[in-house]
Image: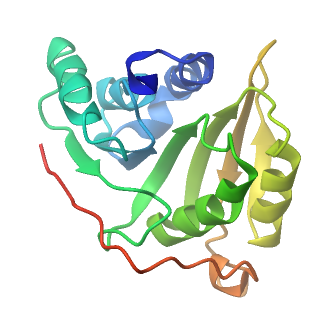
Amino acid sequence: PYFTRLWESAQALAELVVEQQAFFAGRRVLELGCGLGLPALCAGKCGARVTAADFHPDNRAFFLHNAALNGLTGIEYWQFDWRDPGPERQFEIILGSDLIYEREMLEPLVACVCRYLSPGGRFFFADPGRSALQRAVTLFEQAGFSWELHPTREIFRFVFTRPGGAGEKSCSSWGGGYVRDEFRPRVVSG
């Protein structure tokens, strides 16, 4: 299964988390599509309060085993599809790697980040340069996000910042309007 492999984008994202570890201490962090969860585990080691999420029903045991191996017992785990509405929570940081392997995932991703990222929060994102990457950047810009690029030789690492001040363009003004609400996800806490 795909979630048993440590992807290069996840490694690059974990490195970015460690490079900016002071920013993570004490903050609420959500990793989307966590798989083995290396970025989430690094954030936890940096002192963040972490929630890891993945769609695949068999992933939970793998992730929680990795968390236990690293002495991280306070990490929460959600099993949910980030394309669907989920629990009403906000996070100061969202992590994601290898999330846009299909073009149809772009608008749901922006909608998910808008739903869960608190105003002024940051979305740390890594991608190997798939064909949909430029469109993803454009959609985040349209939603009012600013961004910084932190590339490696093979992986594009972005930090998207959601506007947080009064009068700034925000996610609510984004024209994407993606909503898929026919399914309510299961939430599993660990």
- Position of the C terminus by quadrant: top left
Image coords of residue 69 (percent x, y)? 17, 12
Using the rendered image of the protein, determine whether residue 98 is visible from the camera's viewpoint: yes
Q: Is residue 68 above or below residue 43?
A: above
Q: Which residue is at 36% across, 23% downward?
A: 36
Image coords of residue 83 (percent x, y)? 50, 63
Horizontally, residue 58 falls left or right of residue 33, namely left
Image coords of residue 97 (percent x, y)? 58, 34
Image coords of residue 130 (percent x, y)? 80, 34
- Position of the N terminus by quadrant: top left
Q: Quadrant of residue 110?
A: bottom right
* The one of 139 and 15 positioned closer to us in this rendering: 139
Using the rendered image of the protein, determine whether residue 119 is visible from the camera's viewpoint: no
Q: Is residue 29 above or below residue 69?
A: below
Q: Which residue is at 57% across, 21% downward?
A: 19
Horizontally, residue 117 falls left or right of residue 42, namely right
Q: Which residue is at 78% across, 42% downward?
A: 148
Q: In which quarter of the image is residue 138?
A: bottom right
Q: Which residue is at 72% across, 87% downward?
A: 167
Q: Is residue 53 above or below residue 70?
A: below
Q: In which quarter of the image is residue 50?
A: top left
